[in-house]
Image: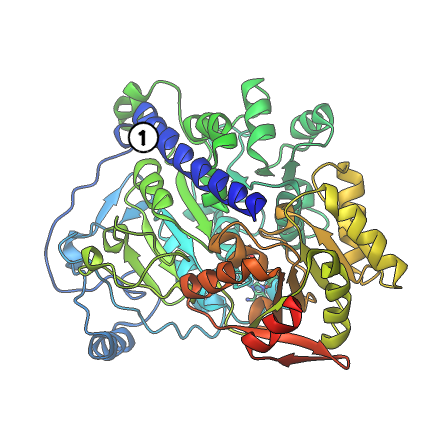
Amino acid sequence: MPALTATRSCFFVGNYLSLRIFSRLQKSVSFHTSLPVFSKVGHETEPLTLTSLGLKSETETTTGNEKNRLQHGVSTLEFPKSKRKKVGSNREKLVAAKKSPDIPAAPFAAQSFSELGLPPLLVDRLEKEGFKVPTDVQAAAIPTILKRRDVVIQSYTGSGKTLAYLLPILSGIGPLKEDSSTFDEPKIKSEIEAVIVAPSRELGMQIVREVEKLLGPSDKKLVQQLVGGANRSRQEDALKKNKPVIVVGTPGRIAEISTAGKLHTHSCRYLVLDEVDELLAFNFREDMHRILEHVGRRSGTGQQGSNRSQGWQPERQTIMVSATVPFSVIRAARSWANDPLLVQAKSVSTLESVSSAGPINFPGTTSNSSSSSNYQKLPAVQSLPPNLQHYFFVTRKQHKVDALRRCVHALDAKSSIAFMNHTKQLKDAVYKLKARGIKAAELHGDLSKLARSTILKKFKDGEVRVLLTNELSARGLDVPECDLVVNLELPTDSVHYAHRAGRTGRLGRKGTVVSICEDPEVYVVKKLQKQLGILIQGCDFTEGKLLVTEEEKMLKSVRQ
Ligand SMILES: Nc1ncnc2c1ncn2[C@@H]1O[C@H](COP(=O)(O)OP(=O)(O)OP(=O)(O)O)[C@@H](O)[C@H]1O
């Protein structure tokens, strides 16, 4: 327990520090001053819905909103068509009143990607790749981003957030974009048009593969990975030679190459911060500062106005994404983005609807916070996929790996990820599992980039049945076949639980999460259960089956 307590306090201290540092950073960077100011007026006739974002017909939406209004009893954020302003040459901005905090959930009934306003070439490519129907978060995010709005996208793990931002970006840049006459050509040909930042190499590489898949073999060089751990000069050469329009990388490597003057992003049109709450961490602060200052920014913020009047100042669209959005992200979004909207699976709302009293949809928020009574309240479970079953099993420390083995057999799990908090113990656990005939491998940050991608490939191909890993793999890792997540050591808090658990049950699939803990840790499980608003049932592995057990019975058998 002391170890657990220490880790937990480290996490909270870390969070506190990052909040403080980022609030300072926000002051020093002062993005508000460098962004165009849009007037906000309070008029009322048309709610901000998919219709106002140009997706659905007026009739459909009016009916839908009436229905929503009745169902949810919320007031709407309204503004007349005449108050929509055009800003810049091709960038339509919706000028929205901040009079009323809530915007009703619009009926997202998109049946196809083309309905969302994506260009035919891109829709064809999606069809070929087997993507036929948009997910809810895609249906909400795509039209909003196409309207050039800055956004914070929050939706549960495995709900398709990556395509939610990639598709509108590929509609605007690269070979699949809409009729080129509707878009400005980049002013400088070798400039990068989209920068996507991810906190880990694995996630960065995964996003690259997703973009490559959509671009197709002949154009895949238009996306370049800039992740740490890979050869930097090769990345710089590739930038020079291939002139990519999109780069995807980790904060450190992007900042490094940018500082060396080898990455030209001043005219960049899109900046994506994937797993944004993780990117706010203390260790990324300097690199993120550099990225936020340089991507889509001409040097000298004081000249912004004059640059714009000369008609060449690019306007960066900032897109922030995560399953968990604590209030620090909302605060960062207000500072870094331009009047951003909060996009969730079935709603688009203003950030004003988010209470500073607590994070949005943040596992850990108590639902009875009276100070947030005027604000939108969101169930904490929204970070978690809907089809997960959660269990815990109590045993002694020395029996944990054997419990993992029994758990894998009891559930007949084909592809499992087991999390531990410290790298050192992974090897030992892998050794024990292999000795019992289970194909296992370890994945952690101390391995080389090549070793990491080889192991990940083996796991994805089914050659490794149990992947023993640490927090490195908790975010973003997409292995659709993963049917079991095991916490061999408890996560430090509910946010980490949510991201770990989210490696299974992806895109509507079923999944099981089992936390294997010691007797004194049961109270932590109870706390997680309460904070996340889920049921975590006690279980046992008897005769090759997982059986739900009474807690008292389970604890009695461990204490004997
Ligand atoms: N419209 C779609 N139709 C079918 N499959 C899809 C669709 N959109 C995304 N997917 C697939 O769903 C899986 C999960 O998507 P993705 O990794 O983007 O989820 P996510 O919400 O970003 O998850 P996390 O929060 O864990 O990062 C991926 O395998 C992706 O290819």
Question: Is 96 placed left or right of 316 in the picture?
Answer: left
Question: Is 379 placed left or right of 467 in the picture?
Answer: left
Residue in view at x 65 percent, y 35 percent:
227
- Identity of the residue furthest to the left in this view: 43
Q: Which of 193 and 473 is in front in this view?
A: 473
Q: Where is residue 381 in the image (x, y as percent from the top left)?
A: 43, 66
**Residue named by callout 1:** 31
Is residue 504 visible in the rendered structure shown here?
no
Q: What residue type is labelled 1?
A: Phe
- Identity of the residue furthest to the front in this view: 560
Q: Which of 361 and 481 is in front in this view?
A: 361
Q: Position of residue 151 (x, y in %)?
A: 37, 49
Quick check: 151 above or below 534? above
**Quadrant in which the C terminus appears:** bottom right
Q: In which quarter of the image is residue 53?
A: bottom left
Q: Which of 245 and 153 is in front in this view?
A: 153
Q: Position of residue 350 (x, y in %)?
A: 26, 54
Q: In which quarter of the image is ligand 1?
A: bottom right
Q: Does the residue labelled 1 lie within 8 Å of ligand 1?
A: no
Helix or strand or loop: what does disc 1 sit on? helix
Q: Quadrant of residue 413?
A: bottom right
Q: Nearer the viewer, residue 375 or 40?
A: 375
Residue in view at x 26 percent, y 34 percent:
36
Q: Quadrant of residue 533?
A: bottom left
